[in-house]
Image (spheres, helix red, strand yellow):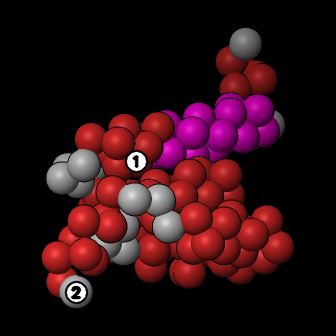
Amino acid sequence: MEKARKESIDIPDIPRIEGIKKMRDIFGRRAFEYLVINLWDENKWVRIAAADSLAELKDIRANHFLVLFINDSDKDVRSTITSSIGKIMDENITETIGSDHGFLTKAV
């Protein structure tokens, strides 16, 4: 049983992956904690789906948790984590620069 479970780590768990995406689509930011919890899952595809979903939410709070997995043992997870952090940062920087804080428009 344990051997089969360890071997299934690299096999996509489609029902759970789809569940993560549906949770994000239905609940949006209210699914934040559920998505964060899935970053610790044994299945790398579940971790990837969770990181992607957090990036889709573009909630800056997610970076605190995503950074914890920047050195994940799986290269696909590391790549997705890095990409997710970038997407969240890009969105939040754009919002900050795009908003009128007064001093930016006066300086230009």
Q: Evaluate whether residue 65 shows in this view.
A: no
**Mark number, residue 81:** 1
Q: Main secondary structure of the magenta part?
A: helix
What is the three-letter code of the residue carrying label 1?
Answer: Ile
Identity of the residue drawn at 57% across and 46% down: 88
**Mark number, residue 67:** none
62 is within the stretch colored magenta: no
User: Is 65 placed above or below 58 here?
Assistant: below
Where, by quadrant of the figure, is residue 87 drawn?
Answer: top right
> SS at mark 1?
helix
- Reading the image, the residue beneath label 2 is 1
Nearer the observer, 101 or 52 = 52
Circle 1 or circle 2, nearest the eye: 2
Left or right side of 36 for 23: right
Pinpoint residue 2: horizontal percent, then vertical percent: 18, 83
Identity of the residue drawn at 27% across and 77% down: 5
Where, by quadrant of the figure, is residue 4 drawn?
Answer: bottom left
92 is within the stretch colored magenta: yes
Q: Evaluate whether residue 31 shows in this view.
A: yes
**Residue span colored magenta:** 84-99
Marks 1 and 2, the one that precedes in the sequence: 2
| Residue contact at pointers 1 and 2, CB within 8 angstroms | no
User: Is 104 placed above or below 50 here?
Assistant: above
User: Is 37 placed above or below 22 here?
Assistant: below
Pinpoint residue 74: horizontal percent, then vertical percent: 24, 49
Number of residue marks: 2
Pinpoint residue 49: horizontal percent, then vertical percent: 53, 58
Identity of the residue drawn at 56% across and 81% down: 34
What is the three-letter code of the residue carrying label 2?
Answer: Met
- Residue furthest to the bottom: 1
